[in-house]
Image: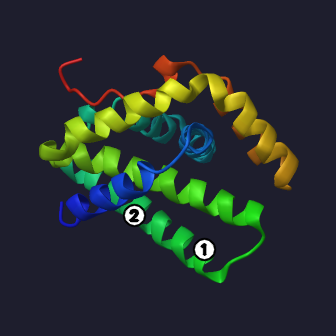
């Protein structure tokens, strides 16, 4: 996929400077995004829900076209986050948008790296690095609760995301598993 190398380089350049608190934030947001997609598709029909659930859990089992579609969708999300960041706002709002940007970009890279296998090892390494901060998710959740005025359904997703196990968080990126 065109442009993924640049996106990954940009992600890594910014990710490398983040402390453990911000890395835990990104992990929390990445899981909240996944759970929100589950909720969105659960309302449609069981077949759509199962497909999306499997996409996030076992993306390597999907074909190139499906992965490219979801990758493009998350790239579009990152562009919306960047536009919102350009508008500015309170520090808590900016941090929230930055976390959404990182998490959306991570999902775009996850799906895209299965299509472009040359990036897969590097994206898997990012996930392995992020899940090291699973024990800090409660603190990240506390910041979200205290600083953002989230709707109850979004707060519920964040609470669920903060209690997920490492195994529930890591996408299976190897089709042989």
Coordinates of residue 5 in the picture (x, y in percent): 21, 59
Q: Is residue 177 left or right of residue 95?
A: left
Q: Is residue 23 above or below residue 83?
A: above
Q: Is residue 163 above or below residue 16?
A: above
**Labels 1 & 2 near each other (Cβ < 8 A):** no
The N terminus, quarter of image: bottom left
Coordinates of residue 109 in the picture (x, y in percent): 32, 50
Q: Is residue 76 above or below residue 147?
A: below
Q: Earlier in the sequence, mark 1 or mark 2?
A: 2
Q: Is residue 152 left or right of residue 169?
A: right
Residue closer to the observer: 7 or 69: 7
Circle 2 residues within 10 Å: few <14, some 14–19, many ≥20:
many
Disc 2 element = helix
Residue lying at 75% horizontally and 65% vertically, measured from the top left: 91
Residue lying at the far bottom of the rendered structure: 87
Disc 1 element = helix
Q: Nearer the viewer, mark 1 or mark 2?
A: 1
The residue carrying mark 2 is 75
Residue closer to the observer: 74 or 62: 74
Coordinates of residue 157 in the picture (x, y in percent): 70, 38
Residue lying at 82% horizontally and 55% vertically, measured from the top left: 148
Q: Quadrant of residue 93?
A: bottom right
Residue closer to the observer: 8 or 63: 8
Residues under labels 1 and 2: Cα distance? Answer: 15 Å
Coordinates of residue 97 in the picture (x, y in percent): 62, 62
Residue lying at 18% horizontally and 66% vertically, measured from the top left: 2
> Can the viewer see residue 69 in this picture?
no
The residue carrying mark 1 is 85
């Amino acid at each position: 996929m065109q442009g993924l190398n640049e996106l990954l380089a940009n992600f890594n350049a910014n990710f490398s400077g983040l402390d453990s608190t911000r890395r835990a934030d990104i992990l929390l947001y990445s899981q909240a995004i996944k759970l929100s997609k589950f909720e969105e598709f659960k309302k449609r029909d069981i077949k759509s829900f199962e497909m999306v659930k499997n996409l996030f859990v076992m993306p390597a089992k999907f074909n190139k076209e499906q992965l490219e579609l979801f990758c493009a969708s998350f790239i579009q999300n990152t562009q919306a986050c960047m536009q919102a960041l350009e508008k500015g706002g309170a520090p808590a709002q900016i941090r929230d948008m930055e976390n959404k940007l990182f998490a959306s970009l991570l999902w775009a890279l996850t799906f895209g790296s299965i299509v472009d296998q040359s990036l897969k090892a590097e994206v898997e390494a990012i996930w392995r690095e992020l899940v090291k901060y699973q024990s800090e998710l409660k603190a990240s959740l506390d910041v979200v609760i205290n600083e953002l005025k989230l709707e109850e359904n979004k707060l519920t997703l964040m609470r669920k995301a903060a209690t997920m196990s490492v195994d529930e968080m890591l996408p299976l990126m190897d089709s042989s598993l």
